[in-house]
Image (spheres, rainbow, N blue to C red):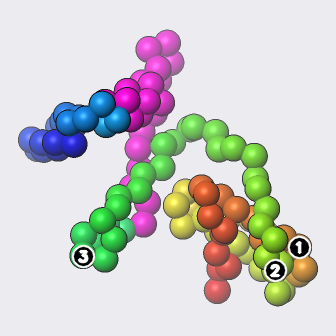
Amino acid sequence: MEIKIDKNLVELKPGTTEETEGLEKLWRLLVDCMRKNRKMVPVGEYVPGKENLARFYIEELPGGQTEWSTERAPKDEAYYCATCNKYMNVKKGAEVPKCCGREMEAMD
């Protein structure tokens, strides 16, 4: 994927068929010709030497149904998703929720 940045304008140019399909899917999630368009908001950090991955949350896009892991909460605690910043309160002994494809983390 080729990325060009000119002041406040970002251009994404796919280089493969898979990237073209991914960009089209992203475009359809962000652009709604009949209503207002959605925004992408950065989540977490992007440090190339640490992890070569940048995450973004799409505002006003509903998430899916909460899934649960087999892991149990050791105490009453709030859990959060480091990807989308969603949080849930979980009682001691209850299953730990999953979000964005992985277990949510306990808030210390």
Foreground disc of the pair 3, 1: 3
Tag 2 and tag 1, C-beta contact below 8 Å: yes
Judging by the rendered image, the residue that carries numbered circle 1 is: 94
Amino acid carrying mark 2 in the image: Ala
User: Relative to residue 81, is residue 1 drawn left or right?
Assistant: left
The amino acid on which the numbered mark 1 sits, given as a three-letter code, is Ala
In the image, which disc is placed on residue 73? 2
Residue at the location (42% across, 52% down)?
A: 56
- Tell me which segment is drawn in magenta: 20-44
- Does the magenta segment cover residue 29? yes
| Mark 2, secondary structure of its residue | loop
Q: Can you see residue 23?
A: no
Q: Amino acid at mark 3?
A: Gly
* Residue at 34 percent of width and 35 percent of height: 18
Q: Residues within 10 Å of mark 2 (few under 14, many from 20)?
A: some
Q: Is residue 90 above or below residue 6?
A: below
Q: CA distance from mark 3 to mark 1?
A: 37 Å
Q: Earlier in the sequence, mark 2 or mark 1?
A: 2
Report which quarter residue 40 is drawn in: top left
Q: Which residue is mark 3?
A: 49
Q: Residue 78: where, in percent of width, then height?
A: 73, 74
